[in-house]
Amino acid sequence: MDINIKIGDRIKELRKAKDLSQEALANIAEVDRTYMTKVETGKRNVTVKILDKIIIALGTDFMTFFNDNNFKK
């Protein structure tokens, strides 16, 4: 599976667990909603800087974010 899809799936999983819409998460992370949609669907390469903003907006950290079975394959 492509890394962009893995990252997008993980963001979507954590976003839904927080009961946030894409728009709400985008607002908290200070990124455009359409960009967030493309990141979640794996259609956009996310920079480390933007990924950091998204991870913080999700209330987590890089270690927890990447400590998922999808990244261990």
Image (cartoon, rainbow, N blue to C red):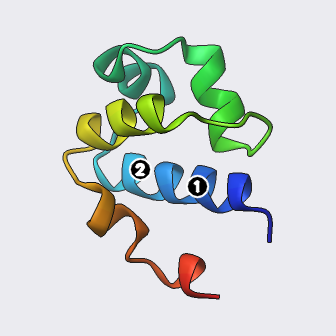
Q: Which mark is residue 7?
A: 1
Q: Is residue 3 left or right of residue 59?
A: right
Please give the name of the residue rendered at 28% of the width and 48% of the height, measured from the top-left corner. Answer: 18
The foreground one among 44 and 23 is: 44
Quarter the C terminus occupies: bottom right
Q: Secondary structure at mark 1?
A: helix
26 horizontally vs 59: left or right: right
Task: Categorize mark 2 by other alpha carbons within 10 Å: few (<14), some (14-19), many (20+).
Answer: few
Q: Residues within 10 Å of mark 1 (few under 14, many from 20)?
A: many
Compared to residue 51, the image places residue 26 above or below, namely above
How far across and how far down the image is residue 45, in percent? 70, 37
Q: Amino acid at mark 1?
A: Ile
Q: Quadrant of residue 14?
A: bottom left
Image quadrant assignment for residue 26: top left
- What residue is shown with label 2? 16
Residue at x 55% of width, y 16% of height: 33
Q: Is residue 6 above or below residue 24?
A: below
At label 2, which amino acid type do we have? Lys
Q: How far separated are the C-alphas under marks 2 and 1?
A: 14 Å
